[in-house]
Image (cartoon, helix red, strand yellow):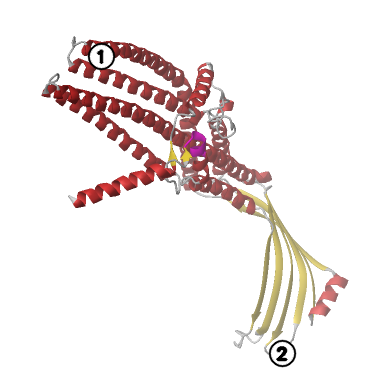
Amino acid sequence: MRQKLKKGLCIALALADWSASAQNKIMTERDLVRLSQENSILGKAYDAQAAGKAAALAMTREMYGARLNASASQLKSGESPLTEFQPTMTPVTEYSATVLQKMPYGISLEGGVFAGQSSALDRSFENATQVGAKLSLRIELLKNRFGSIDSAQIDAAESGRKRGEFERRIARKQHEINIRKVFWSLVANWQSIELSNKLQESATRQLKYAEDRRRIGAADIGEIARYKSQLQSRVGSVLLFEHEREVLWQTIQRQIRDFNPREYRLDGSFLDSSQRAITQCLQKVLATKTIDRDASLFDEVIDAYKAELTNEIKVTEQHGSPQLALFGVSQMSGSNNSYSAAFDHLVDKKQTSTVIGLELDIPLGSKATHTEQALIQAKRNEIEAQYEQLQSDLTASFQTMESNLLILQKGLRNQADTSTNLTISYRDTLKKFDQGRVPLSVVITEQDALFQSELQELTLRKQITHTLLDYFAVFSEFPCSWNQINSNPSSN
């Protein structure tokens, strides 16, 4: 018995501690949205996906940046020559530095300087030195003519970056919507608990009244049992809603880092202003008769997908094409028996050499063509599936929203009328019971019917809120205050 009392005291203290800490902050919709933005567990994943697209663009652009290549080497050899006329060169020292610039026009330009010095092992000559500068140019004439592939690759990567940014914004908006739906589920749950607690208090008073009547012989044991059953039913309803509340808090904890539900509580102070904002948005949505594409980021993503597909196909279509390139190399050098003398010779004599040529590369057989077709089909299927799904979501969300909201509104009005009539009926039944004209079971049945009707009202209100939020998950830029909760400090 002592152990049970100790355990009960611990539970009571824990509940008291929770109740005290819960007085700290009143949870509002704006608070929850702010927390979800600042401490979102999924936020880093959204940012990482967008950063990956931006990195892909940076890597593509990097291909067309200038690159410096420098090298220095020295060779020493003690090998015998293969023939007596071929001296062994040792030591051999070489230096070079080149800058390569690949431009997105099918042109590559390379310029650099070089120096080298070598001697023969048999001392037939020593310190033969050459210094110079070289300039190379390569122009692609067929496959990448005028940089068609280069431009398509850059444009595809740019479209991917834009798409990644829009997708990040959409994902964050959908995350916000999910959090707000949980919030309004918590509001409906809180209202249900408030209603259940009132009915529990009423059932407790009714049981006490019946027990008092029992003492004077005006009530039998059956009436007492029915009142006890009614009270137990009300307690069960409260416990069920409290369990639902904990599940909802847990859902938030899984999405917001370091969220502690014991620091917050709900009350009804914001409900009137929020309901007005919701009603205004609802009326504005119902008045929208055509798809407002400016109100959604889906169109931007679809356009980015289409641009990406177009450019990816441009690149892929050239997979099996022949390549013809014109190249030229111009070199200026000077030579002597030392670096300074070789440089003087370079300046004074200006010895030059030039090479001009064509390079042709043609894939043979049908494998390249088959590969090209397979790549094009794979790209088309992958990207078209994505933007067709978005297009379907956009259209379906708009076409079904009006009918869904109208049905829910009609259901809410009907349920509100039902609750009004049941309230009148319940009050009349109570009078009849006090007059002894109806049994207790009729009173309990009437009260249960009213309770269920009021709960159904709360469910329908929550469903209207959720449905409207689902609409804003697609039409994220829809111009109404309750949708743009982040930019409208006056709305809760």
Q: Amino acid at mark 2?
A: Arg
Mark 2, other Cα within 10 Å: few <14 / some 14–19 / many ≥20: few
Left or right: where does residue 285 sit relative to residue 411? right
Under mark 1, the amino acid is Leu
Q: Position of residue 298 (x, y in %)?
A: 53, 31
Seen as rendered, the residue at the extreme front is 216
Q: Which residue is identified by label 2?
A: 123
> What x and y, as percent, mark residue 73?
65, 77
Give the residue drawn at x 22%, y 19%.
Answer: 444
Magenta run includes residue 31 = yes
Residue at 58% over, 25% down: 479
Q: Which residue is mark 1?
A: 430
- Report the side of 15 relative to 377 (left or right): left
The magenta-colored residue range is: 27-33
Q: Image quadrant of residue 219?
A: top left
The percent coordinates of residue 413 (x first, y second) are 40, 14
- Contact? badges 2 and 1 (CB < 8 Å): no
Q: CA distance from mark 2 to mark 1?
A: 127 Å
In the rendered structure, does residue 305 fall within the stretch colored magenta? no
